[in-house]
Image: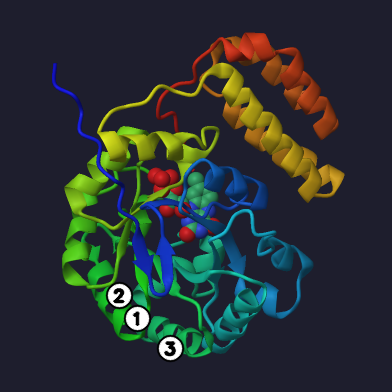
Amino acid sequence: MMTQKRCRVVGFRIGSLELENPLVLAPMAGFTDLPFRRICRRLGAALTYTEMVSAQGLVLGNPMSRRLILSDGSDRPFAVQIFGSDPDVMAQAARICQEEGADLVDINMGCPVPKVVKRGAGAALLERPLVAGRILEAVRRVLRIPLTIKVRSGWTAEQVVAPEIARMAQECGVDAIALHARPRSQGYTHCAQWALIRQLRESVSIPVIGNGDVLSPADALTLRDATGCQGIMIGRGARGGPWIFSRALAMLEGGRLSPEPAGSEVWRIVETHLESIRDHYAPDRALHVAKAHLLRYLRGRPASARVRESAVRASSVAALRAIVRDHLTLLASEPGEEGVSSQQ
Ligand SMILES: Cc1cc2nc3c(=O)[nH]c(=O)nc-3n(C[C@H](O)[C@H](O)[C@H](O)COP(=O)(O)O)c2cc1C
């Protein structure tokens, strides 16, 4: 019988930051807070991103914005992603992130949400390379830590600007680029075009972090082999299943799919996650965030309908934890669905 060859997973470097493997947790608004970043890091992500944070909010001292960039070190190395359109404000915000302990600052150049784009930020910067360049120069000037950008491929499928933006970013001293391989116009309606990630990798010398539709451990291996990208960024595939990182690592190492973690292990992770949410937020916010995550963990587990109903009605995180504990046997006996995802 042939034995599968194991190979050491090679990490990569973003400027001065040495990463132990290629796996990166994508920024996700409402999801990639400190408790979730910590879990993903423990389960194998080499780098985690905060959700996008308003540069203006940080500069004006908005407590909500400031809270989003907090870390206790357990999620390190972590990146803070900022969005905005004014070079001076972006530079001031980047400096705040650096002072607060971020390992890296990322500029959002891909968010398609109208509220953001209307203000000239996010994906709007793909159409305004001059402004984008001024932002990068201003931010680079104040940062000692590495700088990355996260882009979509362009505004429409016909107009691919990522390589042009990436070359400009490289000249401005950006240390890596993450590409969500879809245009702004597509939202999530089409498949990510991984060929664009390969094309981008061939057009710049800084590392490329490939992103889009890595929903299972096997997808991580396929993306790396198809594109040669140095980093593999996972978003939706980690919601309700952060063990995608440990399983993807096993896949990259041995080329073989490891089983889903045992039910009891899954529920131990869920409990730890809920406790960590409880400790991080004020009670009302904690309940809201904990429910959002728990409902994700329950997805694709058919017999969990009853548990889901109780969870929706729960009035505290302690009640949610009790529900999980009471139904542990039922939940632990059910595997989740591989690669379940929802479109944002
Ligand atoms: C709920 C949600 C929130 C997101 N928030 C952000 C964000 O704050 N900043 C960002 O650059 N991308 C954001 N994204 C996009 C993801 O980072 C990622 O590019 C996209 O989901 C494609 O990767 P995936 O197929 O692995 O999910 C978000 C995606 C989702 C589903």
Mark toward the viewer: 1 or 2: 2
Name the residue located 57 percent from the left edge and 79 percent from the top edge: 94
Counting residues from the N terminus, which is met first, the one under dot 1 or under dot 2? 1
Q: Amino acid at mark 3?
A: Glu
Mark 1–mark 2 Cα distance, whole angstroms, equals 7 Å
The quadrant of the image that shows the N terminus is top left
Q: Amino acid at mark 2?
A: Ile
Mark 3–mark 1 Cα distance, whole angstroms, equals 12 Å
Q: Amino acid at mark 1?
A: Pro
* Image coords of residue 82 (percent x, y): 55, 70
* Image coords of residue 143 (percent x, y): 52, 84
Mark 2–mark 3 Cα distance, whole angstroms, equals 13 Å
Q: Which residue is mark 1?
A: 129
Mark toward the viewer: 2 or 3: 3
Q: Which residue is mark 3?
A: 137
Name the residue located 43 percent from the left edge and 88 percent from the top edge: 137
Counting residues from the N terminus, which is met first, the one under dot 2 or under dot 3? 3
Q: Residue 249 sits in which quadrant?
A: top left
Q: Are marks 1 and 2 in contact (CB under 8 Å)?
A: yes
Dot 1, crowdedness within 10 Å: few (<14), some or many (≥20)?
some
> Where residue 165 is drawn, which disc sits there?
2
Image position of 196 (left or right of 121): left
Instruction: Report whether the residue tagged 3 is closer than 8 Å to ligand 1.
Output: no
Q: Relative to residue 288, is residue 23 depicted above or below?
A: below
Mark toward the viewer: 3 or 1: 3
The secondary element bearing badge 1 is classed as helix
Dot 3, crowdedness within 10 Å: few (<14), some or many (≥20)?
some
The secondary element bearing badge 3 is classed as helix
